[in-house]
Image: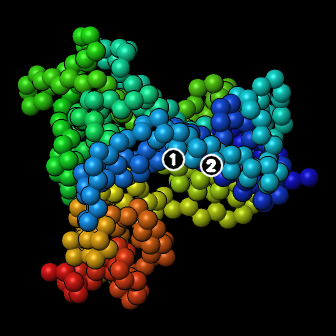
Amino acid sequence: MGKRIVVIGGGPGGYAAAIKAAQLGAQVTLAEAAQVGGTCLNVGCIPTKALLHTGEFYRKVAMNAVAGVKTVGAFLDWPAVQQHKEKIVGKLTGGVAALLRHNGVKVISESASLLPDRKVRIGNEILETDAVILATGSVNTDLRFPGSDLYGVIDSTKALSLDEVPKSMVIVGGGVIGVEFATLFNAVGTKVSIIELLPEILPPVDVEIAGFLHETLMENGVQLYTGAKLTGVEKSEDVLTVGFEQNGETRQVTAEKVLVAVGRRPRTAGLGLEALGIKLTRGAIDVDDYFRTNAPAVYAVGDCNGRIMLAHAAMAQGVAAAEHIMGAKPHYDPKIVPSCVYSSPEIACVGMTEKQAKESGIDYSVGSFNLGGNGKSLIDDAGGGYIKIIADKTLGEVLGIHMIGSRVTEIIAEAALCMNMEGTVEDIVNTVHAHPTVSEAVCEAAMSVFGKSIHGV
């Protein structure tokens, strides 16, 4: 009999770990109290992107933004949009359940907690294990402020299932979640305002990329208040008044809905961590490079360890943890995990920003290419953008690639693959890129590092 592994949590990290462990010969039980697929499939990545896709298409049709195509009286059937979203979610979560069955993973629809001596309680059942993988994900950060419990103040989960499109919305938080919802509701006709505490939206993103999106959002009618501190929300009839301080002044903006999107925090309550003495830092489970906690044979992957709160990172960590338990050699490099923002235009990046390279004292070079010179971007009528490459000046090794523009989330894997192989800008230049594609702009940006772009200036 193979090793007995219990996975707690059926999100991307959990189901990937369970399937990989089963493929490697383990006897796997997965405990999931809600739905398999976790936040990503049910109330995160997938439903958000389904709505964003429809919203962007509607915006183009309603504004006659597609060259040569004229429409009159475009109508958004919001209930049908919601049904389409739910259909996609149902298909994908059903697919995950089928994959787990196909790989022989036993799924128990109950909550689970750790017990001493490598035991786990799942519902009323106690299982003996050889190893446990915690993959419990995260929850919305609960920001408390005067008026936070008023009707109409919502979180991202509720924002995905609104019965109708609100006429106006204030979004508290200019991170990835806030920006994506701003893009969505702006596209379907909502008057959107963003209140962000920090000086700029999307703090982890390269400052030039974030600045480009800032300007684009404003051009599309989104009001942006950065360096602004929320003071509270008041309600009068059907209107919410949001108060904030900016540049020493007290300001207000009104809206029908207030979406609080200030990030997520690890879900660790009720797992029995205290009894096993498992260490946490700022609410996240401490793990080593193989995702082991300080408790024997207990691993933690994905959002609950707080390292990188991205679904694809959780999946990669889940696979790595399963491989380590089963004696295989995992490969996971936290420095080469791409990030995507499904704004309009899209953002995709991997590796160091220019600011990080500068702060690290690295002697680096920068190359960039404006997508205004890229045929496929012009065909898509995507509103511009650019690709930026940061490379080691001596060796030419690619340290980071940052993109904003049409379809860039589809080509960021090229950048990650190059970095994973310790590739250089010369490697990119020497790779023939198909034409016309957005991806050939990556080659142009690489040429630009040497000051020799063919189609750039």
Give the x, y percent position of residue 413. Answer: 46, 68
The residue tagged 2 is 92
**CB under 8 Å between callouts 1 and 2?**
yes
Q: Secondary structure at mark 1?
A: helix
Residue bearing mark 1: 46
Query: In the shown orientation, is residue 37 left or right of residue 120?
Result: left
Circle 2: is it few (<14), some (14-19), or many (20+) Cα within 10 Å? Answer: some
* Quadrant hosting residue 184: top left
Q: Is residue 158 visible?
A: yes
Q: Amino acid at mark 1?
A: Ile
Figure quadrant of the C terminus:
bottom left
Report, in whole angstroms, how far the alpha carbon at label 1 lies from the one at label 2: 9 Å
Residue at screen point 91% across, 52% down = 1
Question: Residue 239 occupies which quadrant of the picture?
Answer: top left
Relative vertical location of residue 376 with respect to residue 221 in this rendering, above or below = below
Left or right, 278 with respect to 46, comes to right
In the image as oriented, which residue stretches furthest toward the front?
72
Q: Is residue 36 left or right of residue 231?
A: right
